Image (cartoon, rainbow, N blue to C red):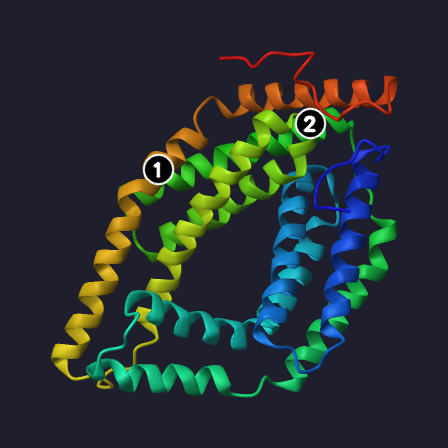
C-alpha cells in the first residue's frame, strides 16, 4: 500500500503500525543485497525519512518517538557515505555539464569517493538497527484521541516550517537553509499521508511541497560540495570559477523558494490544522457510511478561503 492514510485503518495507531511495517519490510528487502548500489541506498534512506516524517506528526502522543526516531536517523547515517559521494559528483555535473579542465582534479577526487567500496560493518549495523526497530512496531502505541493527535501534529509542523523559513530568509546560511529543508520535508510527507482525504486539494499541495524540498535539496547539495573542496586542490582561478558558479546557482534558487514557501505555509498554523482535521473527519465518516464510494470529500465540503 502507498505511503498514506487509508480508510481501512481503524485508528491512527493502526495506521502508524501498518505504514511502519510496510516501509521497514521494503527497506530490509533492499538491504538483503550486500552490494548495495547507490540507488538502493537512496531508496532505503527515503523510506527512513518518510517514516520519520510520520513519527514527527504523531510525536506528541507517541511515547517511544525519541528512541525510534534516533534509530531511523542512525541507520540512515550509516548508509549515507556512498550515497553522499554519488550526490557530490552529480552536483558537480549539474553545475558544470562539461567539466572544465581546470576542475578535473576535483572531479577525479569525487570519482574516487564514489567508487570506494562501502564499509561492510556499516551495512550490517544498519540492518541490525532496522530489524530491531521492525520487531518493535507491533507494540507501538499512541495516547489520546485521534483527531486531537492529528491536529496538534499538523499545527506543530506548519508552525516549525514557517518559523524555519523566516529564519532562513533573515540569514540564508547553510544551517538555516538545511533546517528549513528538514521542516519543509515534514510538511511534504504529511501532505502525502493526508492526500486521500481530499485529493483535489491535497495533491497540488503535495506537488508544490515536493518541488520546494527538491530546490532546497539542490541548494544544500551545492553547499556540501563547496565544503568538500580540499584547500589547494585547485589553482586560484579554478577555485574562484567553482565558487562563483556555486554561489550564483544558490542565489537563483533563493530567488524563488521563499515566495513558494510563503504560499505553502500561509495561514495560522492552528486554524489550518483544525481545517485539515475537519476534512479528515469528514473523510473518515464518509468511508464508514459508504465504504464502496470514492475516497474524496469534494462533494461534501467546500474549501475555506
> Image check: 237 left or right of 205?
left
Kindly state the secondary structure of the residue where label 2 is placed: helix
The residue where tag 2 is placed is 197
Looking at the picture, tell me which residue is in the foreground, 122 or 38.
38
CA–CA distance in space, label 2 to label 1: 29 Å
Measuring 73% from the left and 46% from the top, which residue is drawn there? Answer: 2
Q: Is residue 183 above or below residue 143?
A: below
Looking at the picture, tell me which residue is in the foreground, 76 or 26.
26
Q: Residues within 10 Å of mark 2 (few under 14, many from 20)?
A: many
The residue at the far left in this view is: 237
> Image check: 11 left or right of 304?
right
Quadrant assignment, res 260: top left
Measuring 28% from the left and 55% from the top, which residue is drawn there? Answer: 250
Label located before the other in sequence (2 or 1): 1
In the rendered image, residue 167, in percent from the top left (x then y), is placed at 35, 42
Quadrant assignment, res 187: top right
Residue 214: assigned label: none
In the rendered image, residue 229, in percent from the top left (x then y), is placed at 30, 77
In the rendered image, residue 197, in percent from the top left (x then y), is placed at 69, 27
Quadrant assignment, res 22: bottom right
Measuring 46% from the left and 48% from the top, which residue is drawn there? Answer: 213
Marks 2 and 1: CB-CB under 8 Å?
no
> Image check: 280 left or right of 241?
right
The residue where tag 1 is placed is 166
In the rendered image, residue 74, in percent from the top left (x then y), is placed at 63, 66
Measuring 42% from the left and 36% from the top, which residue is drawn there? Answer: 163
Q: Residues within 10 Å of mark 1 (few under 14, many from 20)?
A: some
Kindly state the secondary structure of the residue where label 1 is placed: helix
Amino acid at each position: 500500500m502507498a505511503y498514506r492514510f487509508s480508510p481501512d485503518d481503524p485508528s491512527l495507531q493502526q495506521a502508524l503500525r501498518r505504514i511502519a511495517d510496510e516501509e521497514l519490510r521494503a527497506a530490509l528487502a533492499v538491504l538483503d543485497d550486500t552490494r548495495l548500489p547507490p540507488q538502493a541506498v537512496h531508496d532505503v534512506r527515503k523510506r527512513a525519512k518518510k517514516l520519520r516524517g510520520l513519527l514527527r506528526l504523531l510525536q506528541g502522543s507517541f511515547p517511544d518517538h525519541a528512541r525510534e526516531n534516533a534509530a531511523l536517523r542512525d541507520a540512515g547515517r550509516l548508509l549515507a557515505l556512498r550515497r553522499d559521494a554519488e550526490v557530490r559528483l552529480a552536483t558537480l555535473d549539474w553545475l558544470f555539464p562539461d567539466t572544465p579542465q581546470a576542475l578535473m582534479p576535483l572531479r577525479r577526487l569525487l570519482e574516487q569517493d564514489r567508487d570506494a567500496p562501502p564499509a561492510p560493518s556499516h551495512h550490517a549495523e544498519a540492518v541490525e538497527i532496522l530489524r530491531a526497530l521492525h520487531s518493535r512496531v507491533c507494540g507501538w502505541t499512541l495516547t489520546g484521541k485521534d483527531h486531537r493527535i492529528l491536529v496538534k501534529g499538523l499545527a506543530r509542523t506548519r508552525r516549525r516550517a514557517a518559523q524555519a523559513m523566516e529564519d532562513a530568509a533573515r540569514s540564508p546560511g547553510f544551517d538555516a537553509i538545511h533546517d528549513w529543508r528538514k521542516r519543509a520535508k515534514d510538511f511534504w510527507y504529511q501532505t502525502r499521508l493526508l492526500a486521500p482525504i481530499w485529493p483535489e486539494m491535497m495533491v497540488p499541495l503535495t506537488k508544490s511541497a515536493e518541488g520546494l524540498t527538491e530546490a532546497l535539496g539542490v541548494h544544500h547539495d551545492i553547499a556540501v560540495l563547496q565544503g568538500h573542496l580540499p584547500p589547494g586542490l585547485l589553482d586560484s582561478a579554478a577555485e574562484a570559477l567553482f565558487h562563483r558558479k556555486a554561489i550564483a546557482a544558490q542565489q537563483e534558487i533563493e530567488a524563488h523558494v521563499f515566495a513558494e514557501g510563503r504560499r505553502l505555509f500561509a495561514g495560522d498554523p492552528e486554524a489550518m490544522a483544525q481545517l485539515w482535521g475537519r476534512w479528515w473527519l469528514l473523510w473518515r465518516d464518509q468511508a464508514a457510511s459508504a465504504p464502496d464510494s470514492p475516497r474524496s470529500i469534494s462533494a461534501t465540503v467546500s474549501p475555506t478561503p
